[in-house]
Image: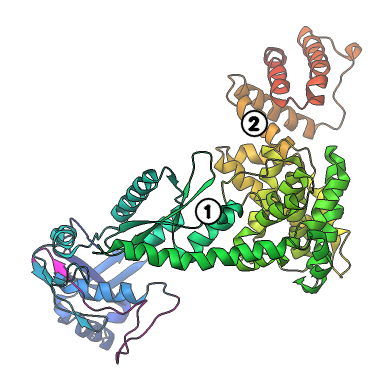
Amino acid sequence: MLIENLATAQPDKNIEKRGPAIQAAFASDGSPSKAALGFAQSCDTTFEQLQRLKTDKGEWLSFTQAVKGQATEQLIPDIIRQAIATLPIAKRMRWGSFATEFVRPVHWAVLLFGEQVINTEILGLTTNNTSQGHRFHGPAPITLKHPHDYAAALFEQGKVIADIEQRKTIIRAKAEQAAMAVGGIAHIEDDLLEEIAALNEWPVPITGNFDPRFLALPKEVLITTMQTNQKYFPVEQADGGLLPHFITFSNIESKNPESIRQGNERVVTPRLSDAEFFWNQDLKQPLAARIETLKTIVFQEKLGTVYDKSVRVSQLATHIAERLGADAELAKHAAMLAKTDLLTNMVGEFGNLQGIMGRYYALAEGLPSELAWALEEQYFPKQAGSETAPSLMGQILAIAEKIDTLTGIFSAGLIPTGDKDPYALRRAALGTLRTMIENQLVLNIPELCQFALTQYSHAFDKEATQTQVVEFIFDRLKSYCLDKGYSVDEFESVMSLSAHEPLDFMQRLQAVKAFRQRPEAESLAAANKRIRNILKKSETAPATEIGLLSQAEELALLAAARQAASDIQPLLAERDYQATLNRLAALRSEVDAFF
């Protein structure tokens, strides 16, 4: 850690201490009381040196003490020790015969304040100005004269790149160069880049190869095997297919890099062979043959097995498909197969391939492509900001799966609290909303929740649970809308109408935001508020018959309002709320004239 522009000392300050009230500071004869003398002693002064403090609440004895600020080098050791002690390290370790605990054994510690060396105890070691470099390329101690020398000295004398961001940049560039040398493009994911940068102080790329026969396996299987097990960067072709190469990084400039390459090739071959075995074994049994085995896996104690969940999701998916005019039978079939790939050898080994392998196995046995893709897309969006399911069948399955989880977990009484959300219900709610809104799906949240809740047989309050789930989902919608730049009052204005279709809600919200930008908006809003207040106080209905009106302004407003009401009917039918509000905004002159 390098801290710049640090003050050399704390500022001097005056500390005011308040003592006993004046009434209690003196005895009956006017001499100082025991309380006053005790206060003076606690301030390390005499009674005569005390002052009086007057406020609107009374008068007290007081003492102002000038405290000189401590030098920074005296404060730093305790600050560092306290910071290290409170680091959120889940599992600490001890080493040697020391009682000291840290995330990993510490062998040396440098502490400098400018050019001054601070010698203190940190993690059982005495700090100094001597660091160490690479254990092979820079084994000699490195003496530092100034904190700013650290990165350059480690690089030049110790063959260590101290800055992890710099290492990441170097690793990415070298991986891309190595991939280009074999006619490909390095497949680099940020998480793996971060891990490789943390494993290498002096990263040296090594390009390896594997048997092209493994390219017959699904691309995702090869990538997962190379990334998860071996920390390799796969190499892709321009069209996205894989090449039989990988890029690994060594933390040493080896005199025999060929040996390192061959060693890595020997290690990755059995890994890929295992994946090949899983693939061939899984293909021997169709997905449908695994449905029965889902009965042996408990989803949640009150909600039954994964098979029970699949049945519920299939009914809900059928219901949603009918609402959207999609193939209900295909949706039902997809839902029953949705969790079967969890029982395959491949997903058992690589859990992150759930859904993806379902797609591959479904296509391999000749099931419809729309169904196969839905098996993968049921998990979309996979993370915050990632894409929603591209296909309609995938959207149906994704919504059905998430609504079932939300209603089921709420019905079991496992409502998320604070930062605890073990079933990822917040993500499920947001994923449901995004899928509906971003894919223009007209679906009613309360209606879907009500349908889903009728499928549970355990005892719970269905009406109260439905209310809880709907409120939970619309709380996520509020966050979604605020992130999109809408204001709280714009959201609340639409929320007050109980708009239960997320797509319809967003269309109304867009119209409100656009309307308030119009010059007529403020005047019409004020008039609307005034009208509502008048009508609240009136015991009779407002006159809307021409025969009851006499003034020209009254007649003009009624005629204009009737014409506007007629004009907006087709706009409302098409849910064109922005055009509706634009048409109503034209009433401003008649409303203003009326008032």
| Figure check: 179 above or below 569 | below
Q: Is residue 94 magenta?
A: yes
Q: Left or right of 15: which side holds 143? A: left
Q: Main secondary structure of the magenta part?
A: loop
Residue under pointer 1: 212
In x, y percent, where is residue 481?
61, 41
Residue range (magenta): 90-115
Q: Of circles 1 and 2, which is in front?
A: 1
Amino acid at the residue labelled 2: Gln
Residue 238, numbered circle: none
In x, y percent, where is residue 60?
29, 72
In x, y percent, where is residue 367?
79, 49
Tell me, yes or no, if residue 595 can be seen here. no
Q: Residue at x 26, y 88 (%)?
A: 34
Within-10-Å neighbours for mark 2: few <14, some 14–19, many 20+: some
- Near-viewer residue (77 or 136): 136
Q: Left or right of 292: which side holds 475? A: left
Q: Residue at x 73, y 46 (%)?
A: 394
Within-10-Å neighbours for mark 1: few <14, some 14–19, many 20+: few
Residue under pointer 2: 510
Amino acid at the residue labelled 1: Pro
Q: Is residue 502 magenta?
A: no
Q: Left or right of 266: which side holds 21? A: left
In x, y percent, where is residue 15?
22, 69
Nearer-N-terminus badge (1/2): 1
Instruction: Indicate the colouring scheme.
Output: rainbow
